[in-house]
Image (cartoon, rainbow, N blue to C red):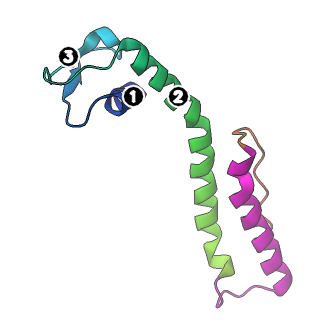
Amino acid sequence: MVFGEAIRLCSPEGCNWVIEGEDVYENITWLSPDKPMPTKDEILQKVAELEAALPMQALRKKRDRLLLESDKYIISDWPITPENLEKMKTYRQELRNLPSFNNPDIAFPEFPL
């Protein structure tokens, strides 16, 4: 999947191509002869960039899920004590701050309730 996305990102707009078999440059069939095909080095560089971004994308996905799951605790009609509301606000802020550390292996905060 990353290989195909790399080709798409390196290709001029409106290009068509298919990958026949394994995800290797030699298996790309370029269907847009009027537009230049990206070089092998361009595609491999983009693959490396995309693969390097995957751990942080996974962190953000988990963070977003945890924020969504904790939304209900901060709405005004949810039965929660002021002390627990503050704990939940702190937890949610810690979740929002996670990507700023740029470390996909960082520990997630524990659910406070």
Does the CB distance between marks 2 and 1 fall below 8 Å?
yes
* View extreme (top): residue: 26
> Residue, x 38% and y 30% (percent of image)?
1
The kind of secondary structure the magenta stretch mainly shows is helix
Determine crowd level at label 3: few under 14, some 14-19, many 20+ residues with C-alpha closer than 10 A: few
Q: Residue 74, can we see it?
A: yes
**Relative to 50, is 43 above or below?**
above
Q: Residue 29, labelled with which disc?
A: 3
**Relative to 41, is 101 above or below?**
below
> Residue, x 69% and y 60% (percent of image)?
96
> Residue, x 78% and y 56% (percent of image)?
109
Determine crowd level at label 1: few under 14, some 14-19, many 20+ residues with C-alpha closer than 10 A: many
> Residue, x 23% and y 21% (percent of image)?
36
Q: Earlier in the sequence, mark 3 or mark 2?
A: 3
Span shown in magenta: 75-101
CA distance for labels 3 and 2: 23 Å
* View extreme (right): residue: 83
The residue where tag 2 is placed is 49
Residue 100 forms part of the magenta stretch: yes
Front position in the image: 33 or 47: 33
Residue 26, percent from left and from top: 29, 8
**Residue type indicated by callout 3:** Thr
The residue where tag 1 is placed is 6
Determine crowd level at label 2: few under 14, some 14-19, many 20+ residues with C-alpha closer than 10 A: few
Residue 47, percent from left and from top: 46, 24
Which type of secondary structure does the marked residue at label 3 adopt?
strand
Residue 96 forms part of the magenta stretch: yes
Q: What is the tally of numbered marks visible in this picture? A: 3
Which type of secondary structure does the marked residue at label 1 adopt?
helix
